Image (spheres, helix red, strand yellow):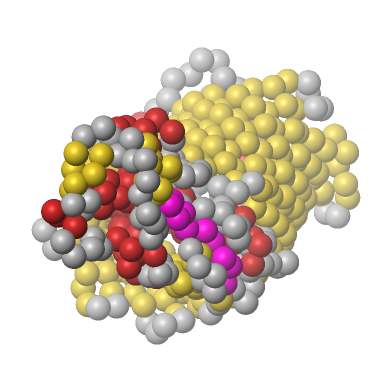
Amino acid sequence: MRGSMGMRKAIAVLLAAMLWAAAPAGPAAAQQPPGGGAAQLLVVQRFVLGPSEILTEEELAAVAGRYIGRPMPVDELYAMVAELDALYEAKGFVGRAVLPPQTIADGVVEVQLIEGRIHQIVVSGNDRTRTEFITKRLGLAPGDLVDLNKMADGLAVFNTAYDVALRAELRPGAEFGTTDYVVYAQEPKNDRFTFWIDNGGRFQTGEDRYAFSWTRASLLGYRDALGVSLSASRGTRSASLTYSVPAGLRGARVGASYTFSQLDIVEGPFEVAKLRNHLSNAQLNVQVPFGLTARWPGSWSLSYHHQDSLMFWEGHELPETHKVTGAWEAGVRAATVAGASQWDFGYTLRSVSDQQEGKSYTIHRLSASWRRPVWAGVLQAGVSGQLSDGVLLPQAEQYSIGGSESVRGYQAGQGLGDAGYNVYLAYSVPLTARMEGTLHIDHGGVYPYKGDDQPVSEEDFLTSAAVSVSARLTDLLSLRMQWGFPLDAHAAGLGNTFYFRLQAAF
């Protein structure tokens, strides 16, 4: 999103230049004063102007008034015409004032106003996007006035809000005073497949994980995305289906998803119990962007989650463990660029209702991050956290630290609590054209429920360092490796961590 205001101005200037060059040249010949015109004096009593859909009567009168009731050379009429042309340009429209051949009688001068209109709109390259989807969001229709600012704004918003890149060219229309818009669309791949393996799972359900996903970017030609994903580890099986479609004309989306997971405890003290958990989550969501071409672009989101959970023991259903919860979630995200720095902020409010136990609680989640180039690399810092008025939240709702993305020197889920925080500092440098190295410093803490008003202990606060290397092995294959080192005295004996992720995307 950075530089979108500059991009919009550049588009407007480019379109203005192209449209001016494309405008029919027929009337322009009348704009040159006749030979000897400077010696001919006349007194204009009245101008016959218009009609105009762009310039107001007040604006026309203000220009014309400067040339009425005084002797002047004939060629000053062309100065007036130039003033009217400048008004069109200032408003971002293509238009010309023209002095047609005429005999001036009784001081009455006719000035024609020719205002450019769209003759036709031609869209190419949109193999997977319907033409009307593009033209509606650009706000273009045959017969409309040629509004350069509207066109530039439409291109800037579309290119920010959707995954298709548009550019426009202008050419003379088939009829006098008209212009054709030629819009070129550059679409991403419509089908994207991703396979990956890593060892970032929790030891209770299996650390080694395998996953596959398929995404179709435009299912029906409306940039409506369909996604399917499957994942597995030694103790988990999960499948999800997602679909979202644009709503409105400025980037809003409405979506739905369904996820089903099966979790078996394969390590730890509950392994012998042979416990299995079935989880399902159905979700409806709306996302509305704001400030797409402003300094602080971002989005609002609102979603509803229906979750169903049931435990099994040695294949037998445990009805008393059946839990149904509903959750409303509202969030906002925003980003900005200040000099060489980039800032990102996020806040989510989650309200959960437990239908079985008849209780509810709220969760507040916040995040902020900053990054900027420093020396030969990029320095990053960030903080995230969670607060809740609930006690002993379900594990899926608790704040977690440890793993490949949080306090990297510890295993995933090393710290769990109803509330918590995480701060990090990272510095990344390119090692080769296809490889990047990063040094991480992480610290986090959690506040679990311990009963009897027991306080948190030093084991609930973790600090670590890590080194990671990300490499693009081929155009399709990437690898990430990470070594983490606990820095806490209470972590003696836990050992270091190693994380890897191998991914193929095509």
Where residue 446 sits: x, y (%)?
44, 33
Where residue 195 sits: x, y (%)?
57, 74
Left or right: 338 in relation to 225? left
Q: Can I make out residue 284 in this image?
A: yes
Which segment is the magenta one?
112-123
- For the view shown, which residue lies furthest in the left direction? 375
Where residue 145 sits: x, y (%)?
51, 53
| Image vertical order of residue 196 relative to residue 145, above or below | below
Q: Nearer the viewer, residue 425 or 367?
A: 367
| Image vertical order of residue 302 relative to residue 196, above or below | above
Q: Can I make out residue 497 in this image?
A: no
Q: Residue visible at 64% across and 52% down?
A: 246
Q: Nearer the viewer, residue 449 or 29?
A: 29
Q: Quadrant of residue 215?
A: bottom right
Q: Residue visible at 66% across and 62% down?
A: 132
Q: Quadrant of residue 220?
A: bottom right
- For the view shown, which residue lies furthest in the bottom direction? 474
Where residue 178 sits: x, y (%)?
51, 65
Left or right: 466 in relation to 365? left
Q: Nearer the viewer, residue 204 or 393?
A: 393
Q: Is residue 148 magenta?
A: no
Q: Residue visible at 28% across and 74% down?
A: 435
